Image: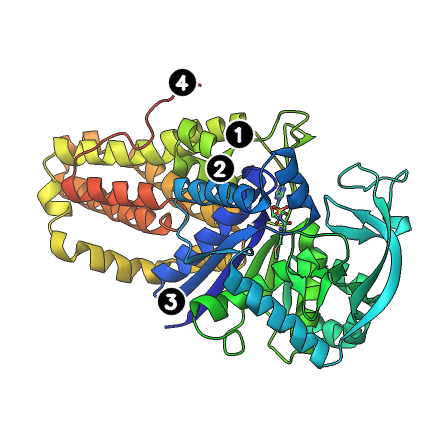
Amino acid sequence: MANKFITTPIYYVNARPHIGHAYTTVVADTLARYFKEKGDNVFFLTGTDEHGAKIAQAAERANKAPKQYVSELASDFRATWQGLNIGYSQFIRTSDPQHEKVVVDFVQRLKDAGFIDKRRYSGLYCIACEKYLAPEELENGLCPDHKTKPVSQTEENYFFTLSRFQKKLMRAIERNELAIAPATRRNEVLGKLRAGLEDVSISRANVAWGIPFPNDGSQTIYVWVDALINYYSATEMYGGLSSWAEHPADVHFIGKDILWFHAVIWPAMLLALGLPLPKAIATHGFFTVKGEKMSKTLGNVLDPLLLAKEYGVDPLRYALSSTFPFGEDGDFSKEVIMQKYESELANELGNLLQRVLVMINKYKLCSLVAKKKSVKHETMKKNSREEFGAVGEHIENYRFDLALNAIWDIIRQGNETIEKEKPWALAKNNKTKLEEVMQNEYKRLLLVAYLIRPFMPATSSAMERQLTSCEPEPLFPRINS
Ligand code: MSP
């Protein structure tokens, strides 16, 4: 049995969860469930990032005290993940005093080890990014991601001597000790690293909503430093699988916008303390909705909980995981979910289950195909573990889309076999062949139920129930949208 430590980013609580957050969380959950299914011991961590200027501003806009505001939003995230059937092990909040204590200790150790000094710094700060932008990064004087004007700041800050880690980081990435997927993202990081590294400011003089810097109450710890340490503090707070030193994260799931923090700043912080690096960073692309960036102003922000209510949890999980290759940008909309619901879910999977069970009933074959009821589940697990094969490989390579394609090939073959073998004709003239065909289709469905379990846990259970009772019920009833 192996141990796996899987993380999502901790989400900013400046707004309710949207479909971009749901994507990261659903694919991470799928990988976690897959490992569990294979018998691994999994620690799956998610949570919320609750400090910093951006959150303080959001609380102010909502006319609430920061602590109350972040607690409400953290509950929204928890409720959303519950609604999407996310089986996380722990939900960490950076305003938890236990986490705060670990962060202070971590920063103190960086300081003791000689990686922190105090300097005067002037720069252009984007509050939405929570980072300084270099002049060459700006587009017409604006932040390229948020289209807002960064504010000019001059402060005396504590700096982390990131530049000292350039060579070590490059080596770790080149040797895939720190694997970055997909390859394009890995190259991007290596390219930037080659160009050189600058030290980074890791404290803020004018942000009250944060963790006080050790031995200097006039500054708070930079929100990104506070946030990145969550992966480590979770192992200290909850035990995790074991300590970070013994078992660092196997994979951090992130979006491409936060790659630099995860592939460079976080690993450098770990190297500075002699702690092991995460084994992998899996980076996904960004969603647009009908070609537009999601934004409150455009009013096109898709709420995952509402979508799950409208289409069902599993259809939403399915549509998110199957629509685009992990790592690439993609476009998403209700139409995409509906189209997938009708064609792949209802017409292909739902239809195969329905027709097979209807025929099994009609030809009175239930006792034959499902006769080993008590051992069925175990047998199925044993057989299909071997057969996770290509599907498992795709999942382990974060190609959730290809894994689902491979499962759908099996489903399509089922529908094709039925068209070809025509059980209704066999029922009249070849009982032996009929039994063989139905037995095979029954087994195929058991396998499919097993293979889809990490993606669509509830549908998998519903399929198993129906296969045990031989009572067909529509898996994906028609919805009017
Ligand atoms: N709080 C930081 C992460 C700290 S991790 C130590 C943060 N939070 S976030 O809420 O802004 O974003 C969290 C994740 O959601 C990121 O991985 C980001 O890429 C992802 N997404 C945000 N908008 C997205 C889309 N439109 N599409 C896909 N994913 C997107 O960054």
Residue occupied by mark 4 = 480
Going by the numbered disc 2, the residue's amino acid type is Ala
Apparent side of residue 352 relative to residue 89 in the rendered image (left or right): left
Alpha carbon distance from label 3 to label 4: 40 Å
Q: Is residue 40 visible?
A: yes
Amino acid tagged 1: Val
Alpha carbons under labels 2 and 4: distance apart: 17 Å
- The mark nearer the N terminus, 2 or 4, is 2
Disc 2 packing (10 Å; few <14; some 14–19; many ≥20): many
Q: Earlier in the sequence, mark 3 or mark 4?
A: 3
Determine crowd level at label 1: few under 14, some 14-19, many 20+ residues with C-alpha closer than 10 A: some
Residue lying farthest top? 480
Q: Position of residue 73 (x, y in %)?
A: 52, 41
Residue 301 versus residue 447: which sits nearer the camera? 301
Residue visible at 20% across and 29% down? 424
- Residues tagged 2 and 4 counted as in contact (Cβ below 8 A): no
Q: Which residue is mark 1?
A: 336
Q: Is mark 3 within 8 Å of ligand 1?
A: no
Q: Amino acid at mark 4?
A: Asn
Measured in 3D between alpha carbons, the distance from the residue under mark 1 to the one under mark 4, in whole angstroms, is 15 Å
Contact flag, marks 1 and 2 (Cβ < 8 Å): yes
Q: Secondary structure at mark 2?
A: helix
How far apart are labels 3 and 2 at the CA level? 26 Å
| 21 relative position to 422: left or right | right
Q: Is residue 195 visible?
A: no
Read off the residue under disc 3.
Answer: 40
Residue displayed at 81% across by 42% down: 143
Q: CA distance from mark 1 to mark 2?
A: 7 Å
